[in-house]
Image: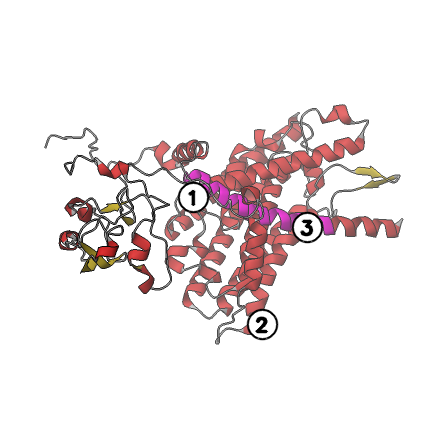
Amino acid sequence: METFYWIDKLVLVLVLFLISLGIAAYQTYFERKLAGWIQDRVGPDRAGPFGILQPIADGVKMFMKEDFTPANADKWLFILGPGIAMFTSLITSSIIPWGTDLQLFGRSISLQVAEINIGILFAFGIISIGVYGIMIGGWASNNKYSLFGAIRASSQMISYELAMGISAITIIMISGSLDLRAIVESQHGMNWNIFYQPVAFVVFFICALAETNRAPFDLPECENELIGGYHTEYSSMKLGLFLFSEYVAMFVSSALMAILFFGGYNFPGMDYLKDSPNLLSIISVMVFFAKIFGFIFVFMWIRWTIPRFRFDQLMHLGWKVLIPIALVNMLVTGFVVALYEHWF
Amino acid sequence: MESLTNRKVVVSDKPMTFMEKLYIPGIIKGMLVTLRHMLMRRKTVKYPEEVREFAPVYRGMHVLKRDEQGRENCTACGLCAVACPAEAITMTSAERTKDQKDLYREEKYASMYEINMLRCIFCGLCEEACPKEAIFLTDRLVPTQFERGEFIYGKDKLVESTDHRIDITKRQFTGKRGTI
């Protein structure tokens, strides 16, 4: 039993790892394709049919480039930066419940790597560590633009984490648990949190954009004023890891949003499939991924629509707009939840 | 002043209303614009596979024509070189000998005729200046090269071969020139 448990988990980890990287790779392809469509272009279409092999070509290109370390850079931190960025992006996917349990070989296999009961706390902890990857990378490069990018990144991520955390607290209050699985279960069927917490969702979504350094909050890497920001000095696969980790982070934060607000793997009419748990499991995973892809699409759609914020506007929005809104929303939610529990 | 185009917009500096300050309606409006563009038909011509049709008056690489009997039209009068605003054309003339009668149409011919394709601006003035209908601009493209010298086209590249005639009918009756 124990050995089977470990084998299950190992297989799941491996599959998740490959899926995260594969999705991140195809996100780069889809991002370019979508950018093309929005700008009335075709996008990459040379590598394979419809340019399907473009990510592979990009990966090969990244590996073939010269791996250059600047003379005055701190060598170990320079290597550590992209490593941390990639690690923190990937590790969050371990706590995400990807679907209902599978029934295989007479056993029930959970589609969640680590069933910890403080899932949300863990996710926020890891996301906060994510800033270290960028900060260390920017600092170790010993370049003023990199340092500017890193400072911007850290101040931006710290400011937006507050509003993000506060809007997540409202969800915790509603579902009464920090466990992601329990939060998903509480949104059974179509009973999604978005219908109760639209304001928290908007705040959370904006903060997720800022946390993943996506436009309109891509100040840390702003090409035209910081020449790439924190990864100015990076080349070859180290740069690839930074770019990749952004896409993995986008994937994971889309998954988190789907869990917290859009019912995770829940879909209307899932009770009809109670008798065939495997079918239910497969469909739930597909539904979950459909939601994730929806969010990823919106992320990209926004990126190619809205221009970048100025830095003071960014700070203004974070501290003077989003945090008060999130706070008021949290107080009202707490009040209503307390009323509901005591009087009804 | 009265606007001629009817597209004049008066710039105003009024403070933003509450809805405008929310930004979200504006952002959604912008996203709908990009969505519309996402679904539009693309106008891209995928070049190596499909080639866009040239305009009938397209001016590309030159050709030195031969007449029906396969004799070169050019008499090395030099009018094209004089007309050329970029000074891309140069030539030396020679006198036709008796046994060259089936090679050149008139007594004088160009023993050397060169066009520097890097200088040429493809204006077509050489074609207009030519009294013998010898030089024409065609819808062929000048291929790219790695060396500058390779862009100086001599008679080997410019004169059409008798068994592979270049069609210049589109350029012939443009109304600029009377018939000979």
Closer to viewer: mark 2 or mark 3: 3
Labels 1 & 2 near each other (Cβ < 8 A): no
Question: Quick one: SS at disc 2?
Answer: helix
Task: Left or right? Give the position of B98 relative to B82.
Answer: right
Marker disc for residue B47: 1
Measured from the top left, where is residue A38 in percent x and y? Answer: 43, 38
What is the three-letter code of the residue carrying label 2?
A: Trp
Which class describes the residues within 10 Å of circle 1: few (<14), some (14-19), or many (20+)?
few
* Disc 1 from disc 3: Cα separation: 36 Å
User: Which of the chains bears the disc numbered 2?
Assistant: A
Q: Nearer the viewer, residue A65 or B23?
A: A65
Measured from the top left, where is residue B169 in percent x and y? Answer: 27, 37
Query: In the rendered structure, does residue A27 fall within the stretch colored magenta?
Result: yes
Camera sees residue B88: no
| Residue found 39% across the figure and 52% down from its top | A311
What is the three-letter code of the residue carrying label 1?
A: Tyr
Residues in magenta, as a range: A14-41
Which class describes the residues within 10 Å of circle 2: few (<14), some (14-19), or many (20+)?
few
Closer to viewer: mark 1 or mark 2: 1
Question: Quick one: SS at disc 1?
Answer: loop
Can you name the residue that lies furthest to the bottom here? A71
| Residue found 56% across the figure and 63% down from its top | A64
* Disc 2 from disc 3: Cα separation: 27 Å
